[in-house]
Each structure stands twice: as C-alpha cells, then as structure tokens.
Amino acid sequence: MIKGFDSSTPLTAHTAEWMAAQGYRFAIRYLVPSRYAWKRLSRSEAEAITAAGMHMVSVSQTTAQRASGGALAGHVDGESAKREADLLHQPAGSAIYFAVDYDAQPSEWDAIEAYLKAAAAVLPGFQTGVYGSYTVIEEMAKRNACGHFWQTYAWSQGMKSHYANLFQFQNHISVAGLSVNLNESYGNEGWWNTNEKPNPSLTTGDADPVIRILQEAGKTVHTEEDRNEIHRLANVLRRASGQPEQ
C-alpha cells in the first residue's frame, strides 16, 4: 500500500516538497479545460510534483454527474482530456480517470458505460479509468468499461472492491495548508511523472516489416543518394518504435 492524496488545489514547489516529506508518494490532479483554471494541472506543477519525488494520477471531472450524459458527453470529455494530456506531455501508456462523483444508481449504468467507452475511443495510447463508489467500480469492471479503478469510500457502505487500484478513504483533510482527500494505492495505478519518456507511438511489430521492405528495396537502387534515403527512412521507423538506429 502506497500513500497519496487528491486535491483540487494546484501545488507549488514548496507544498509538493512538503507533502513528499510527509510520506506521500502520489498526487491525483485534474485534467480540465482552462475555464476550470482554479483546479487545472499545469506543466509547471507537474514538474514540481515530479521534482519532489511524487507521481501523478490524472483525473477528468467538470461536474459531479457528467458521466450520466452518456456517449456524447464521454466523447467531448475524452477529447478535452486528450488536449490537456498533450499539453502536459503526459506519457502514452499512463491512465486518465473519469469521475462519477455521486451516488450513481443501476438505472444509470448503461449511460456511464457509454460515457467511459466513448472517452476511451478518442484517447489512443492512453489507458482509462473510473472514479466512483463500490457499486460503480464493480459494475464498470464487469462491463469492461475501462481498465483502472479508483474507488471512494463515499456511498460504498463500508465495502471495498477487489478491482480497486486506488482507494479514497478520507475527505477534506488540511495538510500543509491544502485541502486534500487521502488515498492509498495497490498497484497498476496508471500514474506518471515528467521524467518518463513517452511510449513509442509505433510498435516494433508494425515497424519491422516495413523496415524489411525498405531494406529489400535498397538492394535494387543504383545511387548512393537513394540508398541513404532508404537508410534514413528505416531509422525514422526505428526511432518511432523505440528501437536503436543502425
């Protein structure tokens, strides 16, 4: 179990260092449009959190019941989260959670599932997750609506899902002048920091066959200029797939 917190208040370098000194190892912060600037994660804040030795977990939330808006709301929020993640240089392969911050009922399961899947569809390269109560976590896990799960104790009647990667167990605590909610994590959180290199956008499985085709074509060209160009293109594919150049 690893100790962390979520907060709607941006951290400074000082508060990030202080929180890390208290033993917190991750901070959950918001990917939201600029009109929500009061709680929006910035690149400079992300760098300060990383410099303090903590990881970040990204969450998208504008209003508490936004996920009940179904696929259309999910598409809009997924695109917004993608823009924010790109501005932050959040590495591909990390997670973006979407909040269901209310006591959602079974009649809303279909809409919430549609919301999460629509958001995931416009977030290529990122993992997606959901924040919510025990029943939200259990139901969305069973429906394969996402791959990461952040449960809150609220509305959970004392139950904890075995699917939970993160668990929010206490709210509205003042630490270092910040109002925070306390969390713990159990692995596969999908967190990130600004020292991480982005995951390759092209897999070796896709790149290598094209490289072989280029190499075969190189055997038939007659000029040094053409051979150099084929070699250059092969190295572009190697870089894009995370392979060393040759």
Image (cartoon, grey):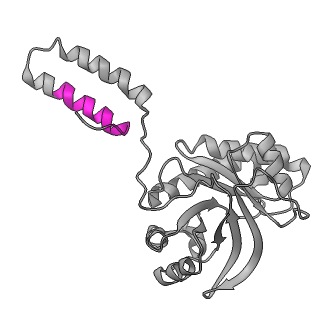
Relative placement, left or right, of 133 versus 204 is: right
Number of numbered callouts drawn: 0
Image quadrant where residue 71 sits: top right
Residue 158: x and y in percent read 89, 64
Q: Is residue 79 visible?
A: yes
Q: Is residue 232 magenta?
A: yes
Q: Give me the residue at 63% from left, 60% from top.
A: 59
Q: Quadrant of residue 159?
A: bottom right
Q: Which residue is painted at 80% across and 41% down in the image? A: 142
116 above or below 7?
Answer: above
Please tell me whether the stretch drawn in magenta is mainly helix, strand or loop: helix
Any magenta on residue 46?
Answer: no
Q: Is residue 163 above or below residue 43?
A: above
Magenta stretch: give its range.
229-243
Residue found farthest to the front: 1
Q: Is residue 31 visible?
A: no
Quarter of the image for the C terminus: give it. Answer: top left
Q: Position of residue 122 (x, y in %)?
A: 58, 43
**Residue 10: x %, y % from top left:** 56, 76
Picture quarter with the N terminus: bottom right
Q: Is residue 229 left or right of residue 224?
A: right
Image vertical order of residue 117 relative to residue 207, above or below = below
Q: Position of residue 205 (x, y in %)?
A: 44, 27
Q: Quadrant of residue 105?
A: bottom right
Q: Nearer the viewer, residue 134 or 45?
A: 134
